[in-house]
Image (spheres, rainbow, N blue to C red):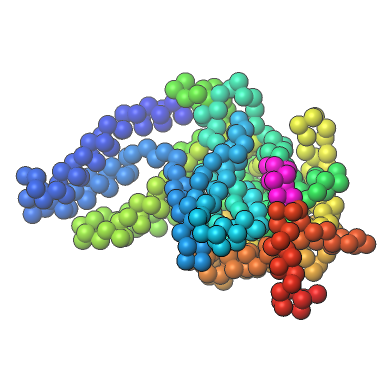
């Protein structure tokens, strides 16, 4: 019922938001009669703010058209490689007519970025993707809004998430021989489960895993987000935050954790900050500070765009990650697509290098939560494990913005490059990556730096 009331209210507000937008443009136009008023700029700013507070925010685009590689502009073609009911595997293919640039990009490592399914769209990682594209072939999981998935597509569970990740890994491995994994926030847990299960079966596992700001062990330095999930019962969540999608959407009748409730929770974490941000936006509009107002719009166009999560997936994540701590306790069983139940055993991972990244000021995943991955992956040689803490970085700072580009990314880039050959397992000989990357590996092995390491 609450979801239906929200949609009714949003539908009623939509024409007023559109009207406010039109009024803002009229008063900001110096050639209009209204624009001649001495208070025109202030009135325009008021209407503009009302429009942004009342409008509906749809899924943003990645909008990556070109990137610069060593001073050369490279075109980006975004395409869907695999289309699943609840997720698309999206690739950002690079094109260039410069022979040297083409040769360089062709031999760079392939990286699968697993984006969070925790409220925002995968476009939240736009800066992550843009930066990674300079030195890597990039794929990303683009999770779908559950309210747009018809009931005929069935349910979506945490087990399905794990199985999706495995399917995507195999797809990229088939193309390039192997790949590297990067998971940001929420997916660190299911990604580790996916690789663990592949290792237990004797399948080829990714060359490296980069775990960034995720709740591997949410018991360590619990944050306000963790405390809510830990202190409320499973029944409380099911009775208070789960609703059915209204009839106006393709997923009508599906049980979900609605995006608008998640957004309310996001804002409630720092209400004073958001109020100040909007007031500063209002003042910047009056002053005509186009750079600041555009930065505000870009941030909130992304921040305010949220998706619904399937109820089964959401409730199982709460139980497995934040209440039972099934991963670190070694009690997590996952059902494969064939129906076989398998135990998640991170110790079985032997040949995948491991990098964990935390932000010093992260208020979403507390200190030590991601680093805990090293405690449960005892099969990975210590020489192939590394932890990095980004000083002065909050949660978003480890994958977006200046600190990500200047401090975190160089560490991630170097780690992937250093492990672009198969990690040597105890008693085994290191295996080279598949042919598409062999030339790059050989070139790296011949370098003075690589020779010194050997």
| Image coordinates for residue 398, horizontal then vertical, percent | 56, 62
User: Can the viewer see residue 242?
Assistant: no
Q: Residue at x 85, y 43 (%)?
A: 201
User: Is the magenta region chiefly helix, strand or loop?
Assistant: helix
Nearer to the camera, 150 or 392: 150
Task: Say if 250 sits above or below 429 in the image.
Answer: above
Residue 241 % position (x, y):
55, 35
* Residue at position x 57%, y 45% in the image: 91
In-image side of 307 versus 314 (left or right): left
Residue 359's spot in the image, x, y percent? 58, 64
In the rendered image, residue 177 lying in the magenta stretch gets the answer yes
Q: Position of residue 64 (x, y in %)?
A: 46, 50
Q: Nearer the viewer, residue 34 or 414?
A: 414
User: Can residue 44 be seen from the camera position used here?
Assistant: yes
At 55% from the left edge and 28% from the top edge, which residue is drawn?
A: 149
**The C terminus, quarter of image:** bottom right
Quadrant of res 100: bottom right
Q: Is residue 405 above or below residue 233?
A: below
Please give left or right for residue 419 compared with residue 378 in the image: left
Q: Looking at the image, how many numbered discs can be counted on the residues?
A: 0
Residue 154 magenta: no
Using the image, determine if residue 337 lies above or below residue 203: above
What segment is highlighted magenta in the picture? Answer: 168-178
Q: Nearer the viewer, residue 19 or 444?
A: 444
């Amino acid at each position: 019922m609450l979801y239906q009331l929200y949609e009714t209210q949003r539908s009623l507000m939509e024409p007023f938001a559109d009207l406010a937008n039109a009024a803002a443009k009229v008063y900001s136009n110096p050639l209009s009669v209204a624009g001649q008023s001495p208070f025109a700029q202030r009135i325009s700013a008021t209407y503009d703010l009302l429009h942004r507070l009342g409008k509906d925010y749809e899924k943003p685009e990645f909008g990556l058209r070109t990137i610069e590689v060593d001073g050369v502009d490279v075109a980006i073609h975004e395409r869907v490689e695999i289309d699943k009911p609840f997720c698309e595997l999206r690739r950002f293919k690079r094109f260039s007519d410069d022979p040297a640039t083409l040769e360089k990009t062709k031999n760079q490592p392939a990286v699968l970025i697993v984006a969070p399914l925790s409220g925002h769209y995968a476009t939240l990682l736009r800066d992550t993707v843009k930066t990674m594209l300079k030195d890597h072939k990039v794929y990303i999981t683009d999770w779908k809004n559950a309210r747009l998935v018809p009931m005929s597509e069935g349910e979506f569970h945490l087990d399905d998430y794990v199985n999706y990740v495995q399917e995507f890994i195999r797809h990229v491995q088939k193309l390039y021989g192997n790949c590297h994994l990067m998971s940001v926030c929420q997916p660190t847990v299911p990604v580790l489960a996916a690789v663990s299960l592949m290792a237990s079966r004797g399948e080829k596992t990714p060359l490296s895993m980069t775990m960034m700001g995720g709740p591997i062990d949410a018991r360590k330095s619990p944050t306000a987000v963790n405390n809510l999930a830990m202190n409320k019962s499973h029944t409380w969540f099911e009775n208070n935050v789960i609703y059915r999608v209204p009839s106006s959407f393709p997923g009508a009748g599906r049980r979900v954790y609605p995006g608008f409730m998640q957004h309310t929770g996001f804002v409630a974490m720092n209400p004073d900050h958001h109020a100040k941000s909007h007031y500063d936006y209002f003042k910047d509009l009056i002053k005509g500070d186009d750079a600041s107002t555009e930065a505000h719009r870009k941030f909130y166009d992304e921040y305010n765009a949220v998706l619904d999560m399937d109820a089964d997936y959401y409730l199982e994540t709460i139980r497995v990650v934040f209440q039972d701590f099934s991963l670190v306790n070694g009690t997590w069983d996952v059902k494969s697509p064939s129906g076989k139940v398998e135990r998640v055993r991170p110790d079985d991972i032997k040949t995948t290098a491991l990098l964990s990244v935390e932000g010093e000021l992260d208020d979403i995943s507390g200190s030590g939560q991601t680093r805990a991955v090293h405690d449960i992956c005892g099969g990975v040689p210590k020489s192939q494990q590394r932890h990095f803490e980004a000083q002065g970085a909050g949660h978003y700072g480890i994958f977006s913005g200046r600190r990500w580009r200047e401090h975190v990314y160089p560490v991630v880039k170097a780690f992937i490059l250093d492990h672009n050959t198969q990690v040597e397992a105890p008693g085994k000989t290191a295996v080279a990556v598949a042919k598409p990357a062999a030339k790059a590996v050989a070139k790296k092995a011949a370098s003075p730096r690589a020779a010194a390491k050997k």
